[in-house]
Amino acid sequence: MADKVEFELVSPEKLLVSQPVDMVVVPGGEGNFGVLAGHAPMITTVRPGVIDIFEGDRIVDRIFVAGGFAEVTETRCTVLAEQATNLSELDRAAVEQEVKDTGEDVDDAKTDGDRALAEGRLAIARAKLEAITGATAH
Amino acid sequence: MPSLKDLKNRIASVKSTQKITAAMKMVAASKLRRAQEQAEAGRPYAERMGRMLASLAANVSSDGEGPKLMTGTGKQDTHLLVVISSDRGLCGGFNGTIVREARRQIARLEREGKTVKVLTVGRKGRDQLRRTNPKNVVHSYEDIGRKRLSFAEADMITAKVLEMFEAGEYDVASIVYNKFKSAMTQVVTFQQVIPFALSQSDAAEAQADEGQAEAKALYEFEPEEDQILAELLPKNLSIQVYRSLLESAASEQGARMTAMDSATRNAGDMINKLTLTYNRTRQAVITKELIEIISGAEAI
């Protein structure tokens, strides 16, 4: 694996990751996709889920993102995410609580706008929980 | 002529004021540094967002069927001004200039027969605008970024702006804020955000990018361009709001630092003057007493 792809993970508050990697798997809006060097240029949405960073054949890093956008060129893969946490830093109990709390927010929402916001948060919390469950199951 | 005791008190009070202003200056300086770092950290995201938007817009705008956030409502009747000021005073002309610009814009738009709605961020702007333009101010936020400005707060303001847009409450939205130039100078900036206009620099950047190795990178889009754009535009608005909040926060600290610096210097001048008066008065008292003693002795 001679060619590497420059992976960047950016949140509005800072540049989180910027490193050359062998491959990244990004949870795209229309399904997961892996990016190797020389990937066709592409712009896509990212749904809440886990980004896997590969060195060789091993996953070296797993990062949870709460949705965003990805721009892929032949040499670069840039992910714009609003929230990103390393999977190992997520606490199962806290996330379960979050799912419960946001679920209640959806029920309590008075206006449609509030409801849509709360539902968005619920979806993110659920994806987070799923990511943890998936990680421990392996 | 003030008595010696009065002068002494006066000097003591000016001295303690000077201590306060000097401390405020230090605090503002360190806050300014933090604000600048934060603004710096937020730049990569905004840059990449701009690049993506530019390449997307190049693909979409040609057919003229873009999302409303980009093409506008087709009218220009109602304007929304988002005025960003600070919560606290003692920062020189910071809030004054922002409010003056906002009033000028309101007056200009109303002369053109348009309706103007104002959304204020920060207590000072709200108070001053409410006094002169009570009917224009529709909503206000306070205590934004009190500890550390977070993106979530910018998102919250954006959500309100978008909600109003979707409800058809206005056609054009602009942000009025202080752009940070240096610690000494802030530039009042009037920036239109809805309908979205691609800034010159972003477009140029995208072209420069394309000109480079990625010779006319023709992106694939997944899902369709307009769908991505529909998601990207609100995000971009959040970023714009976030950035102007950051700029404004940095400007505020810069303005405060400058104001406090000159206040400290003025206090120093005042102390010098008062001390001089104090010493002269003291001398005068001594001379007077001496004369009294001498003339008393001579009389004997």
Image (tube, coloured by chain):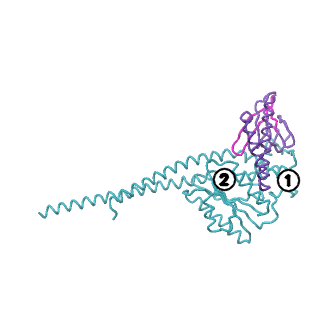
Chain colours: A purple, B cyan
Examine the structure image and report whether residue A23 is included in the region drawn in magenta. Answer: yes
Cα separation, mark 1 vs mark 2, equals 30 Å
Quadrant into which the N terminus of chain B falls? bottom left
Chain under numbered label 1: B
Numbered badge on residue B186: none
Q: Quadrant of residue A99?
A: top right
Counting every numbered tag in the picture gives 2
Instruction: Tell me the chief SS of the magenta region.
Output: strand
Horizontally, residue B18 falls left or right of residue B61, namely: left
- Could you say whether the residue bearing mark 2 is in a helix, strand or loop? helix
Where's residue A115, x and y in %?
A: 79, 52
Residue B60 disc label: 1
Q: Is residue A77 magenta?
A: no
Do we see residue B30 in this rendering? yes
Disc 1 crowd rating (10 Å Cα; few below 14, some 14-19, many 20+) is some
Kind of residue indicated by mark 1: Val
Q: Write down the residue under mark 2.
A: B245
Q: Is residue A27 above or below residue B187?
A: above
Comparing B164 with B209, the one in front is B164
The residues colored magenta run A1-26
Q: Position of residue A67 (x, y in %)?
A: 79, 44
Q: Amino acid at mark 2?
A: Leu
